[in-house]
Amino acid sequence: MRLVLLCFTLFYCSLLHSQTYQLFSPTRQIELIVKVGANLDVQVKYQNQTIIDSCHIGLLLGNGTQLGLRASVQKEERRSVNDTLYPIIPEKRAQIPDHFNELTLRFRQNFALTFRAYNDGVAYRFSTAFKDSITIAAETAQFGFSGKSTLYYPSVVKREDADIFHTSFEAPYKIARLDTLPGVDLAFSPVLLSPEVGPKILLTESDLLGYPGMFLQKGSGNRLQGVFAPYPKKIMVTEGEFPQQIVTERESWIARCAGTRAYPWRVMIIAPTDADLVQNDLVYRLASPNRLQETNWIKPGTSTEEWIIGSNLYNVPFEAGINTATYKYYIDFAARFGLEYVMLDAGWSDVKDLFKITPGMNLDTIAEYARKKNVSLILWTLSMTLDRQLDSIMMQFQRWGVRCIMTDFMDRDDQFMVNFYERIAEATARYKIMVMFHGAYKPAGMQPHLSALNP
């Protein structure tokens, strides 16, 4: 009798402490269901059909604390937003409706979860509220799907000289059934699921700041699970034409962060048609608002690019190559045909020293000539060299009137490298110089935008 009573008590307590929360999109076609109990689980429905069966989520701290395991909700907060975003650089839309419903659950264990339901997708993110800095040992992001789905994914091809987390993020997409997906394949996001019935689902992330990017790999059953590059412990520099940093040993954790912060959004875009995928800009909407006070210097345009042809010019009255005469010719070409920019790709300087200009190149002369022709310059840089010479070379770029730089050969998105992106973006913004990242991870929320309150 006591055993039966004990079992009944335990069962009753588990029911008592298991809580369910619902969140609907503004049109109510999408429903997000959050279950808080022994674990944290999320389910997503579209038009009453389950499209994400269960999403297990959690954070494991370096001290062994598991945020999400037997968590206890302290407070529930809800809000609805119907705003308009104005991109600094119009992309798919010059005005972007930002309409969503939001649920924030604050837990007694000093963390919170925020969920958003849009008419074209859902997203969630963790935030923590610890006084001291913390170490993130691992993140659980498991996306479960019911039924048969075809997966479109870019599989990382492992380099011979580096671990699997080194990639230029330029791999071709593979196609496979989710239930037959090779468990060894590691995909960088976004990945696309196309179920036999129902809308397509695209998995990615946004507001990726100070944290490693999310890869995806097959988990148990019909699951995809997030995989995150551990933090570099030892780094070596390769030899060759374009040296780069290679991680030779990694830590047992993925990030060290301020104790109080928000983490990247885990994004599930829902697209009933292929056209809906093309038009979707949910990653942009989830990004942090613009922090720049002035943005009138951000002016994209059309540029020459000599890398593919190797500066081979014919029937010209000078010796073509990486030299002053060749780039003056490109500037004349740009001015004649209305191109705003001329690109100086790799070769204008020593890749290891941006102040060591290639013989035959006079950057002062080229810069002055470009100014007279009302053409702006874009300069290529090697990422590790740019980082080492950042403050001094930015001042030199400004003296030359450089309007944009490209930086190249990052080929990673661990926390160390993501911090590099932020550092370069902040430095170039200080000097009002635009930046292009090449050998770079997918767009994940660094593009600036303004809200309707500050158009």
Image (cartoon, rainbow, N blue to C red):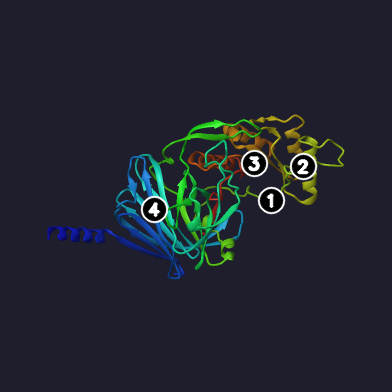
Identify the mark nearer the N-term, 3 or 2: 2
Q: Which residue is mark 3?
A: 405
Helix, strand or loop at mark 4: strand
**Residue 34, located in which quarter of the rendered image?**
bottom left
Residue sitting at x 57%, y 35% = 161
Q: Residues within 10 Å of mark 2 (few under 14, many from 20)?
A: few
Identify the mark nearer the N-term, 3 or 4: 4
Q: CA distance from mark 1 to mark 4?
A: 42 Å
Answer yes or no: is residue 260 visible.
yes
Three-letter amino acid code of the residue under disc 3 = Ile
Identify the mark nearer the N-term, 3 or 1: 1
Tell me whether circle 2 and circle 1 mark residues in contact (CB < 8 Å). Answer: no
Tell me whether circle 4 and circle 2 mark residues in contact (CB < 8 Å). Answer: no
Three-letter amino acid code of the residue under disc 1 = Gly
Given residues 257 and 289, the one toward you in this image is: 257
Tell me whether circle 3 and circle 4 mark residues in contact (CB < 8 Å). Answer: no
Q: Which residue is mark 2?
A: 372
Tell me whether circle 1 and circle 4 mark residues in contact (CB < 8 Å). Answer: no
Depth-wise, is mark 4 or mark 2 nearer the camera? 4
Task: Point out the image quarter for the C terminus.
Answer: bottom right
Three-letter amino acid code of the residue under disc 4 = Ile
Identify the mark nearer the N-term, 1 or 4: 4
Q: Which residue is mark 1?
A: 301
Task: Point out the image quarter for the N terminus.
Answer: bottom left
Helix, strand or loop at mark 2: helix
Q: CA distance from mark 3 to mark 2?
A: 20 Å
Q: Position of residue 146 (x, y in %)?
A: 44, 63
Q: Which residue is mark 4?
A: 57
Three-letter amino acid code of the residue under disc 2 = Lys
The vertical placement of 62 against 54, above or below, is above
Identify the mark nearer the N-term, 4 or 2: 4
